Amino acid sequence: RRKEHETGIGFDWRDHRGDFSEKQGKLRENIQKKDTKVANMRLEVERIKAKETADTPLTQGQQTTVSRNEQVMEKLEEEIEEMDEALNDSLRESMGAKRANKLAKGKSKSKAKRGGDSDSDQGSDDDDEFYDRTESAAARQRRKQKERAEAKAA
């Protein structure tokens, strides 16, 4: 579990017990607001559908409301997913920056003792993580576009 937390794999902002920056806090509040909206809309749809029986079908207005709410919920859930990813990435970066600062302070002291100043002590893992994130973001974007196209076709 600690290894997961350190590498950021399986990391979720909901599990984060540390502080959030002002921007991260606002993003978190927006996600929570949208989550609440989705939950309320889901409840409304369930209540409307509960009125439907074999003898009494839903009215045109009820059907329209259910359809509209489902579309809005889908859009909100996509926005929440994007905001979740942004917040998780932001937290990983800030946690990584804190670790990097701690490591850099430790390395600069040890470099000063040794008298060395080579960049070979710096790993290339940061570059790899950057490219991995970019690649996965592009893949997510392609998947979402494909899903939207399929939804329109259906």
Image (cartoon, rainbow, N blue to C red):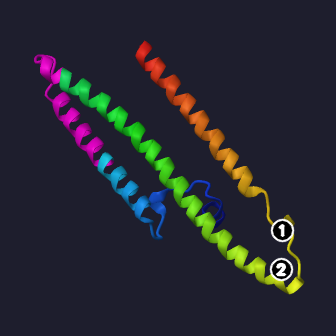
Q: Secondary structure at mark 1?
A: helix
Identify the image quadrant of residue 79.
top left
The question of residue 58 being in magenta is answered with yes
Decide: few, some or many residues near mark 1? Use Cα within 10 Å; few <14, some 14-19, many ≥20.
few
Q: Secondary structure at mark 2?
A: helix
The range drawn in magenta is 35-63
| 136 relative to 105 in the view: left or right | left
| 134 relative to 76 in the view: left or right | right
Q: Is residue 57 visible?
A: no
| Residue 112 x/y as whole percent | 83, 84
The Cα atoms of the two marked residues, 2 and 1, are separated by 10 Å
Identify the image quadrant of residue 61.
top left
| Amino acid tagged 2 | Lys
Identity of the residue drawn at 63% across and 42% down = 134
The residue carrying mark 2 is 111
Identity of the residue drawn at 77% across and 77% down = 107
Identify the image quadrant of residue 122.
bottom right
| Residue 152 x/y as whole percent | 41, 16
Identity of the residue drawn at 42% across and 59% down = 23
The residue carrying mark 1 is 121
Judged by its main secondary structure, the magenta piece is helix
